[in-house]
């Protein structure tokens, strides 16, 4: 923010006749695009500077500008990486400079998007066997067979970033002996997403871009902490879906899916459109037993020690309802959650909660009600005026034997 005034003045100088202003009040985090605040000023486009969670699906075109830094990294001798490696980081420029340190391996780069245009969010026809194709093309009315023949398979994505080979080719799947290297700080939310999703099946390393130190990371502690919330979600009778006002991709589709599943499981479900999640906001609804965060994975509130109710993820809800199994592959991306269709059969009996389980049905107990005949209430004249001297105060005082001094 300290450099934003100089940047704005430079943009105004180079773009005469256009209004440029800074949005520094993101409701969730710096990685999200706040289109709601931009709409309040009538913006035509947004320039997002810094890291991104790659979940934006709004109507305004967005130009993503990532940071640049000169990095000189040499992989430590005890890293012991074999086969292939995927470099994942918040900045594609950083990854490109570090790739030379892995010249003895097959290097794949998870590249974030550089620009999100309106054409990228047109309606798409999807078939799990073939991929996706836009519906706006001229040959769309020819039928699903023609569309399936021309559809392209979805590219391989890791944490909403497309994985490409060093030659630039788009991959469909990773080789078996492939490790993941996160280029960034050890407390990065992107590293946490990598560990939760791939820490059980692939080696994950954290590479500090400043010191050049590499550290092998594990996901056991993270998975143990999150497994406790599965039991809390299973025992909850009233669920609240926390929906972000920002235009997040797939969020409303996941909300519809969870609402249907929870309704079939006998739970009460409420939707809350809320900005930044705080203890004070959620404390206003004590009847809610558990909340489900539908914010982007980078903004998920993992630290909920101060909250009255637990906050779980959509994946934990589906594990609690026995739609999925806890295998160690913790799904954080909404698109992966939607990839598995809803079950047509009934849910397991041990997860279905009846109304009597949480007090919605009150039994009728005969003999406990007493009917008492009460006299009708009488209407009396009230006081008139201000509190210091009511106009009827003297009259009432004389009726009760009081004398005004």
Image (tube, grey):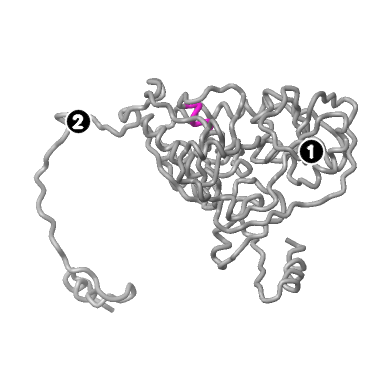
Q: Which residue range is magenta in the image?
A: 315-320
- Tell me if 378 is positioned left or right of 54 in this view: left
Image coordinates for residue 363, horizontal then vertical, percent: 23, 29
The image quarter containing residue 213 is top right
- Tell me if 224 is positioned left or right of 358 in this view: right
At 84% from the left edge and 50% from the top edge, which residue is drawn?
69
Image coordinates for residue 257, horizontal then vertical, percent: 44, 37
Label 2 SS? loop
Magenta span contains residue 263:
no
The answer to whether the residues at label 2 and label 1 have Cβ atoms under 8 Å apart is no
In this figure, which residue is indicated by the disc labeled 2? 364
In this figure, which residue is indicated by the disc labeled 1? 167
Q: Of tags 2 and 1, which is closer to the observer?
A: 1
At 13% from the left edge and 56% from the top edge, which residue is drawn?
377
Image coordinates for residue 32, horizontal then vertical, percent: 62, 51
Q: Nearer the viewer, residue 81 or 351?
A: 81
At 67% from the left edge and 69% from the top edge, which residue is drawn?
20
Q: CA distance from mark 2 to mark 1?
A: 74 Å
- Tell me if 140 is positioned left or right of 177 in this view: left
At 71% from the left edge and 36% from the top edge, which residue is drawn?
191
Looking at marks 2 and 1 on the same chain, the residue that comes earlier in the sequence is marked by: 1
Q: Nearer the viewer, residue 80 or 175?
A: 175
Tell me if mark 2 has few (under 14), some (14-19) or many (20+) residues whose alpha carbon lies within 10 angstroms of its own. few
Task: Check the image and report above or below for 160 versus 220.
Answer: below
Looking at the rendering, in which quadrant would you find the N terminus?
Answer: bottom right
Tell me if mark 1 has few (under 14), some (14-19) or many (20+) residues whose alpha carbon lies within 10 angstroms of its own. few
Task: Check the image and report above or below for 11 versus 203.
Answer: below
Label 1 SS? loop
Magenta span contains residue 319:
yes
């Amino acid at each position: 923010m300290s450099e934003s005034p100089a940047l704005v003045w430079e943009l105004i100088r180079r773009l005469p006749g256009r209004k440029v202003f800074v949005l520094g009040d993101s409701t969730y985090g710096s990685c999200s695009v706040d289109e709601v605040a931009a709409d309040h000023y009538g913006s035509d486009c947004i320039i997002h500077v810094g890291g991104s969670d790659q979940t934006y699906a709004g109507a305004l075109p967005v130009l993503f500008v990532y940071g640049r830094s000169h990095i000189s990294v040499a992989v430590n001798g005890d890293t012991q990486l074999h086969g292939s490696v995927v470099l994942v980081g918040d900045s594609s420029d950083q990854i490109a400079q570090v790739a030379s340190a892995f010249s003895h391996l097959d290097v794949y780069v998870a590249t974030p998007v550089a620009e999100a245009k309106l054409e990228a969010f047109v309606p798409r026809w999807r078939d799990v066997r073939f991929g996706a194709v836009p519906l706006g093309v001229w040959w769309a009315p020819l039928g699903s067979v023609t569309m399936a023949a021309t559809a392209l398979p979805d590219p391989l994505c890791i944490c909403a970033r497309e994985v490409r080979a060093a030659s630039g080719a788009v991959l469909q799947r990773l080789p078996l002996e492939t490790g993941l290297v996160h280029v960034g700080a050890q407390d990065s939310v992107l590293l946490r997403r990598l560990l939760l999703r791939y820490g059980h099946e692939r080696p994950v390393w954290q590479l500090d871009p400043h010191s050049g130190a590499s550290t092998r990371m594990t996901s056991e502690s993270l998975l143990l902490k999150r497994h406790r919330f599965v039991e809390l979600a299973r025992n909850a009778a009233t669920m609240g879906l926390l929906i972000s006002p920002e235009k997040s991709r797939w969020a409303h589709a996941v909300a519809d899916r969870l609402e249907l599943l929870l309704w079939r499981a006998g739970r009460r479900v409420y939707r809350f459109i809320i900005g930044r999640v705080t203890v004070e906001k959620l404390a206003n609804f004590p009847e809610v037993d558990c909340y489900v965060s539908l914010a982007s994975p980078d903004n998920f509130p993992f630290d909920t020690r101060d909250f009255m109710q637990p906050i779980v993820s959509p994946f934990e809800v589906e594990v609690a309802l026995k739609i999925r199994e806890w295998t160690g592959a913790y799904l954080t991306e909404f698109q992966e959650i939607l990839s598995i269709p809803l079950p047509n059969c009934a849910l397991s009996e041990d997860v279905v909660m009846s109304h009597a389980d949480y007090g919605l049905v009150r039994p009728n107990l005969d003999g406990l009600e007493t009917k008492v005949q009460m006299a009708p209430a009488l209407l009396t004249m009230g006081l008139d005026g201000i509190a210091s001297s009511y106009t009827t105060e003297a009259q009432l005082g004389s009726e009760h034997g009081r004398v005004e001094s």
